[in-house]
Image (cartoon, grey):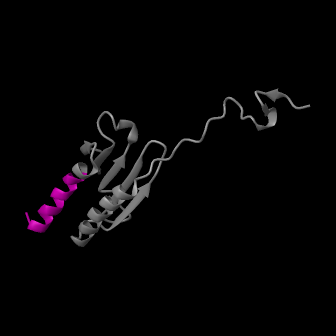
Amino acid sequence: MIAWLSGRTAETTAPASAQPAPRRIFFSRRELDRILSLYGRMVAAGEWRDYAMADGVEVAVFAVHRRSSEQPLYRIEKRPALAKRQGAFAVIAAGGRILKRGHDLDAVLAVLERKLLKLVDGE
């Protein structure tokens, strides 16, 4: 026997407790292009040698390493939940100190750009 519920059969209706899978957070192509551009320049300067990427339910992370066996020097994070407050993007140093947080990725990455300029100028 099939029970009819508002025009659909009982077999086709999902249980009320079933929720869709949580959405994963990723960097967009433009964001990733911007990060990889900076990464390439830092590799050319001899500062960075490796990177790792991770996606999650709350955060996407791009971590840069001097050597792959070490802890990341910097983490570039995207947390959309903070977009209206502090900004979705952050650059975090190895010790966990937040160097810059903001709404615009280019402005946040400027903290690392300044480090590149110091390396090029020799200061």
The quarter of the rendered structure image containing the N terminus is: top right
Q: Position of residue 64 (x, y in %)?
A: 33, 59
Q: Is residue 55 above or below residue 84?
A: below
Tell me if residue 23 can be seen: yes
Tell me if residue 95 can be seen: no
Quadrant of residue 83 within the rendered picture: top left
Q: Residue at x 31, y 68 (%)?
A: 49
Total tally of numbered discs in the picture: 0
Q: Is residue 111 magenta?
A: yes
Q: Position of residue 4 (x, y in %)?
A: 82, 28
Q: Position of residue 88 (x, y in %)?
A: 33, 42
Q: Is residue 64 magenta?
A: no
Q: Is residue 107 above or below residue 29?
A: above
Residue nearer the viewer, 2 or 46: 2
Q: Is residue 65 left or right of residue 120?
A: right
Q: Position of residue 52 (x, y in %)?
A: 40, 60
Quadrant of residue 43 within the rendered picture: bottom left
Residue at the far front in the pictured view: 7
* Highlighted range, magenta: 109-123
Label the magenta part by its dominant secondary structure.
Answer: helix
